[in-house]
Amino acid sequence: MKTLVEQVPAPAHVGNALIGVRGGSEVDLDLRFEAVHEGILVSGTAAVEIAGECGRCLTPIEYDYEADIQELFYYEGSAEFEDDDEADQYWVVDDFIDVEPVLRNAVVTALPFQPVCREDCLGLCSECGKDLNEDPEHFHEVLDPRWAALAQLADFVAEDATTSKTSDKREEK
Ligand SMILES: [Zn+2]
Ligand SMILES: [Zn+2]
């Protein structure tokens, strides 16, 4: 059995457009390699930094994630080895094993499908893009064009009322 505790740079493009591991960011590997009959069993953890943005309000999101890794890398020609495209199967090639696809799988499957900064994030205003978390009361008055003429009339009446009020005052004097 061998152990490996090492910090390596993350491979590029782990994740989706909204969230994932930034290429080159630190990955802390803590792995055990055990020789078993059919191949090499790799187990342990990979600590990564997840970075992305809220799918509703675009606020940056960052958190640490520790992926559990447990995978058997088969020796080529092993009796257990099946050439099955459906299953994720890994193997030892020329005495090397490539842990990257295993790490990628372990991280990507743990990423939130729709990342949010917090569960009740209100998102952005669909009209003007304002962050509704900062102003939950924010809204736009949607005016039906058919009412626009009436609104103008209402303004006119209000204006008229103020003018008559001032003239009333004048008369009082
Ligand atoms: Zn948000
Ligand atoms: Zn708005």
Image (tube, rainbow, N blue to C red):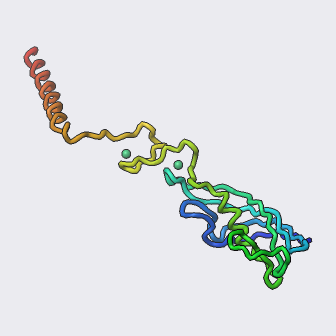
Vertically, is 74 above or below 148?
below
Instruction: Return the x and y of residue 157 as percentages of the image width and height.
Output: 14, 28
Ligand 2: give its quadrant: top left
Vertically, is 141 above or below 65?
above
Vertically, is 116 above or below 142?
below
Instruction: Return the x and y of residue 51 as percentages of the image width and height.
Output: 61, 60
> Measuring 74% from the left and 61% from the top, which residue is drawn there?
47
> Measuring 53% from the left and 44% from the top, which residue is drawn there?
121
Say whether residue 11 is left or right of residue 89.
Answer: left
> Measuring 66% from the left and 67% from the top, which residue is drawn there?
25
User: Front-most of 33 and 29?
Assistant: 33
Say whether residue 166 is left or right of residue 127.
Answer: left
Q: Based on the displayed image, in which of its 4 quarters is residue 78 positioned?
A: bottom right
User: Front-most of 84 and 147?
Assistant: 84
Q: Based on the displayed image, in which of its 4 quarters is residue 15 positioned?
A: bottom right
Residue sticking out furthest to the bottom: 94
Instruction: Return the x and y of residue 58 as percentages of the image width and height.
Output: 50, 54
Residue sticking out furthest to the left: 171
> Measuring 54% from the left and 53% from the top, which residue is drawn there?
54
In the rendered image, the quadrant that contains the C terminus is top left
User: Front-most of 80 and 92?
Assistant: 80
Instruction: Return the x and y of residue 108 as percentages of the image width and height.
Output: 65, 62
